Image (cartoon, rainbow, N blue to C red):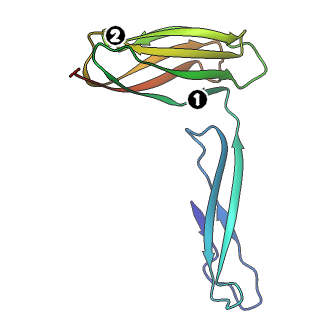
Amino acid sequence: MASYDATIPPGGEGKITLALDTKGYQGKIKKAAAVYTNDPQAPKMIIGLIVDVQVPIIVTPRYVVFNGIEGRKRTQFIDIIAGFDKHLKLNPAQFSLEDKMDYRIVELEKGRKFRIHFSNTPQASGTFMGFLNIRTNYSEKPMLNITIHARIQKAG
């Protein structure tokens, strides 16, 4: 979102304010805005904005996109990393795709980094969407919701 002084007298100064809603973002974000003027020496200028959004828990990728063929096991994974300097604990809360997929949580670095492996069950087919909710010990992010989009085609 941008706001600015609409009229600036010749030789005067104006103000441009850029606002960035970082909700739902994590890590480095780069944004740019073009400023058009009636100054023949600088008819267009680019203003850059770089921010590093610090989050309590980093989830990469942020959701699971799963494609496969019925009867052939396929696995996708996501990584969960503690964003703060304190131990992270994960406890599964709810999984909506129990009849179509399996998952397992592997601790890669004690209290710091986890990998969740998602695999299709042999009988799963069709297009479906679901989630895995995980409780954490971080008061700043007590629940993680991992969205899963899957398309398992019939064999043959």
x then y, percent, for residue 139: 65, 19
Q: Residue at x 34, y 10 (%)?
A: 121
Give, as a three-letter code, the residue at label 2: Thr
Pick whichever, 37 or 15, lies toward us.
37
Give the left or right position of residue 102, taking residue 49 as reference: left
Give the image location of residue 103, x and y in percent: 46, 10
Q: Is residue 87 left or right of residue 69?
A: right
**What residue appears at the point 65 percent right and 52 percent down from the top-left corner?**
30
User: Which is nearer the eye, 43 or 79?
Assistant: 79
Reading the image, the residue beneath label 1 is 60
In the image, which disc is placed on residue 125?
Answer: none
Q: Quadrant of residue 87?
A: top right
Query: x, y (%) of residue 35?
Result: 63, 74
Q: Which residue is mark 2?
A: 121
54 relative to 75 in the view: left or right: right
Amino acid type at circle 1 is Thr
- SS label for mark 2: loop
Residue 153 vertical placement versus 93 (above, below): below
The image quadrant of residue 147 is top left
